Image (cartoon, rainbow, N blue to C red):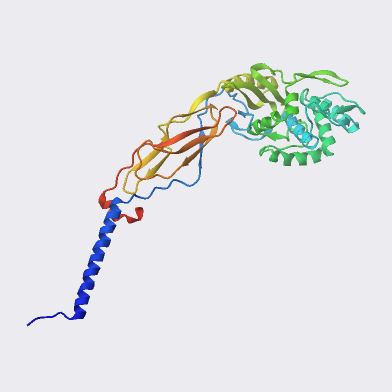
């Protein structure tokens, strides 16, 4: 007797065979794909990363008194000495007066500007400062001086009376000047500077820090009119004659000004600018010293400071080719590190902070060691051209085991 499988049962059996075959085919396809398809790339960080690199500070001959700071004419403060607390500025405050006046009544080089008539209030400033033993420039009621002549008389022989007269002329009163100047210094980035009751700095209520003074010096040097005035060793004041600059060290160690200060409360204060050459390029440095026992002492101490800073420029390896900049962790274990292909070398003032931009592409797998994966770039500055060096892989990528490939489909599909 022949046993015949019912049609319905035969169909179910065939269906199971087809399903098994399909599953086996699908499994085989998965195994082949998992073993043969390339692994997805490992993404680098999006965008360009900014690296802030600070070079080591050197030992400068800072005086023990007060506080100090030094930096560059672009406004960068590179190094400070002692705690930066607001101290009386004395006549260095006249630089702010000059900037404020030129903000309202700007001058070009060789322009005299408006004529200013000395009145009885201005004459009273003169007699009052004489009584208080402050520095003065003789004036008389009815005298006429140009804006430029007033600026010169204020900054070179440091006339306290001229500072108050000039501020009152520009802003209507000393209180109005003070209100404007206290807002203005914040706009200039002098966040720890306060303007007191006069425009001359004779009152100890005008205060600043050495760090702020370095920034102030960079602003003054950037103004062609003021840069010319503060470099003058003397000036011919109308109706008075030749008056000398209290800055007696102009011309020494490359010093080109800027302003002295001296009072019982402030002691000696000096904000100096000096020109030097680095890598055959002209560079201007700024040094500020505050709280000296006397004006002569602060002038004496500034010269070795300036010389030391001028000698503190050096060609430096900013990023060494042995320095790991980033790394990619391989999902199956191990990692691939990246570094610059060659040393990135720049000229710097020791203690200076520089920026570099690191841009990496994604890591393809596999990748051999020495593969260029991106670039490290530095912008041009007054010492260096813009530079860009390749960033390469330090290792070849290892290979995952077949077991890892089969059990980690998300890295493949």
Q: Is residue 23 above or below residue 10?
A: above
Q: Position of residue 374 (x, y in %)?
A: 45, 39
Residue 97, x across and y down, in percent: 76, 33
Q: Quadrant of the image for the N terminus?
A: bottom left
Using the rendered image of the protein, determine whether residue 115 is visible from the camera's viewpoint: yes
Residue 263 seen in the figure: no
| Residue at the farthest left position | 1
Taking 209 as reference, is 237 left or right? right
Residue visible at 60% across and 21% down in the picture: 277
Judged left or right of residue 96, residue 396 is left
Residue 222 spot, x, y in % from top left: 69, 30
Vertical position of residue 314 compared to residue 1: above or below: above
- Residue drawn at the location 69% of the way across and 26% of the way down: 267
Most foreground residue, 216 or 410:
410
Name the residue rendered at 10%, 80% in the picture.
3
- Depth check: give the residue in front, 179 or 53: 53
Please indicate whether residue 52 sits to the left or right of residue 75 in the image. left
Q: Quadrant of residue 98 in the image? A: top right
Q: Toward the viewer: 19 or 362?
A: 19
């Amino acid at each position: 007797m022949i046993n015949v499988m019912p049609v319905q049962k035969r169909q179910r059996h065939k269906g199971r065979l087809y399903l098994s075959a399909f599953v086996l085919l699908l499994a085989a396809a998965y195994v082949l794909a998992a073993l043969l398809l390339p692994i997805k790339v490992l993404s680098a960080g999006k965008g360009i990363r900014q690296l802030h690199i600070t070079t080591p500070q050197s030992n400068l001959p800072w005086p023990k008194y007060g506080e100090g700071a030094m930096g560059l004419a672009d406004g960068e403060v590179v190094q400070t000495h002692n705690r930066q607390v607001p101290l009386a500025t004395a006549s260095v405050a006249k630089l702010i007066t000059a900037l404020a006046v030129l903000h309202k009544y700007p001058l070009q080089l060789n322009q005299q500007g408006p004529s200013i008539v000395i009145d009885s209030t201005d004459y009273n400033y003169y007699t009052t400062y004489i009584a208080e033993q402050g520095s003065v420039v003789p004036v008389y009621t009815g005298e006429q001086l140009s804006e430029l002549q007033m600026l010169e008389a204020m900054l070179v022989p440091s006339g306290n009376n001229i500072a108050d007269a000039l501020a009152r002329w520009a802003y209507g009163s000393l209180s109005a000047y003070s209100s404007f100047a206290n807002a203005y210094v914040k706009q200039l980035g002098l966040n720890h500077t306060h303007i007191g009751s006069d425009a001359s700095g004779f009152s100890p209520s005008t205060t600043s820090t050495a760090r702020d003074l370095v920034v102030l010096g960079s602003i003054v040097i950037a103004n062609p009119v003021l840069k010319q005035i503060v470099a003058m060793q003397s000036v011919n004041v109308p109706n008075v004659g030749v008056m000398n600059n209290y800055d007696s060290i102009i011309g020494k160690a490359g010093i080109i000004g800027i302003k002295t200060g001296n009072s019982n409360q402030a002691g000696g204060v000096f904000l100096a600018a000096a020109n030097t050459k680095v890598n055959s390029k002209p560079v201007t440095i700024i040094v500020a010293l505050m709280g000296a026992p006397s004006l002569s002492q602060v002038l004496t101490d500034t010269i070795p400071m300036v010389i030391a800073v001028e000698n503190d420029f050096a060609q430096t390896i900013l990023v060494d080719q042995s320095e790991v900049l980033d790394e990619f962790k391989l999902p199956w274990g191990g990692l691939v590190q990246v570094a610059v292909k060659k040393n990135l070398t720049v000229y710097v003032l020791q203690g200076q902070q520089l920026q570099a931009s690191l841009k990496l592409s994604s890591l393809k797998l596999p990748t051999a060691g020495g593969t260029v994966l991106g670039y490290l770039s530095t912008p041009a500055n007054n010492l260096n051209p813009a530079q860009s060096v390749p960033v390469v892989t330090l290792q070849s990528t290892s290979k995952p085991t077949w077991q890892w490939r089969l059990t980690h489909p998300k890295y493949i599909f």
